Image: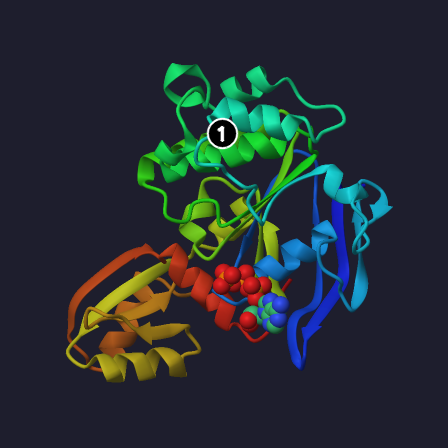
Amino acid sequence: MSLLELRHVSKHFGSYKAMDDVSFSVEEGRIVGLIGPNGAGKSTTMRAMTGLMRFDSGEVIFDNEPVQFGKTKALAKMGNLIEYPSIYPNFTAEDHMKYYAMDSENPEDINELMKLTGIDGENFGKRKAKNFSLGMKQRLGIAIALIRRPKLVILDEPMNGLDPQSVREIRSLIQDLAKKGISFVISSHLLDELQRLADDVVIINKGKVVRKATMDEFLSEDKAQVKVKTSDNEAMLEAAKAAGWTAKLGDDSQVLINVEEGVNAQAVLAKATEEKLDVLDIQTGSVNLEDHLMEVLSDKSTRA
Ligand SMILES: Nc1ncnc2c1ncn2[C@@H]1O[C@H](COP(=O)(O)OP(=O)(O)OP(=O)(O)O)[C@@H](O)[C@H]1O
């Protein structure tokens, strides 16, 4: 049984379908990346799964119970960072932890949590929040979310605005917490950001889930490509397409052809020769991940 399951959830805002038959599940201790462009419906999906927003149809099951709008039971077992907890400029990290622990029935040991999230010590714990970097604030937010011993933590674009060092720190913090059995749903509009973090990906576009896969499966679709420059790239492109190959013009006056069954550098060379085109350069390489994501997003046939 999954920890969280969304079954055919739909949500309209007026005539706009922000969630269209969204189904996916989150297993215990897994990090799920919810990936999609701006406006795809990621935040709406996250709000639906916490019971923070009413949805039109479908159901959400969390920890074997239905999540209902306005009922805080599910929310109490989730660390929800869709709307960040208030950070008070004159409070230290420790003050925040004590303050938020007062709200919790069975709070986690806050000293342990501060150590775990790296907001302890003279430097962090005693410093006022107005002097915190964005990365420190993110870590404090995660520490606050963990006070209630959640089974699932929801993070909306947690890497936004962070420098590369903070991104690495937040990433390893999340991975350590997942090893302890906490599940995560993390949204991002950048696949790159979640590539080394998420175990599973749910790609969402225009309110629809267009692909669900483990990250390993998704990355293995990261196909190889033949990159060829010829005396007439337009003609090469036409010939490749006529042969039924997946091909397009690249940025650097080249034709990019996906390697698939029967298509490799040798076949491309043979085709160029057949077309009486001079081959100026030919290389194989892999498709850029963001390009692969764009392909998935533009794919009309939803393979989810
Ligand atoms: N309360 C609302 N009323 C009307 N439309 C809304 C509301 N909330 C979201 N939307 C619309 O629903 C769509 C999905 O929004 P959502 O915030 O879920 O996208 P997102 O994937 O999280 O994107 P972003 O990264 O830009 O926040 C958008 O077109 C947005 O304008």
Image coordinates of residue 104 in percent, x first then y, are 72, 29
Locate ligand 1 by image quadrant: bottom right
- Of residues 7 and 85, the one drawn nearer to the viewer in this rendering: 85
Res 79 → quadrant: top right
Q: Nearer the viewer, residue 111 or 56?
A: 111
The mark total stands at 1
Q: Is residue 143 left or right of residue 192?
A: right
Residue 8 image-quadrant placement: bottom right
Is residue 179 among what the camera can see?
Answer: no
Badge 1 density bin: few <14, some 14–19, many ≥20, Cα 10 Å: some
Which residue is located at x 48 percent, y 65 percent?
38
User: In the picture shown, does residue 200 fall above or below 13?
Assistant: above
Inspect the image, locate mark 1, and give the three-letter code of the amino acid beneath it. Leu
Q: Please report the residue visible at 25 percent of the width from the left and 84 percent of the height from the top.
A: 235
Label 1 sits on residue: 173
User: In the displayed image of the protein, which residue is found farthest to the right?
Assistant: 65
Compare residues 11 and 182 and report the one nearer the observer: 11
Residue 272 screen position, x and y as percent: 25, 75
In this orientation, which residue lies closer to the viewer: 35 or 47? 47
Above-or-below relation of 23 to 73: below
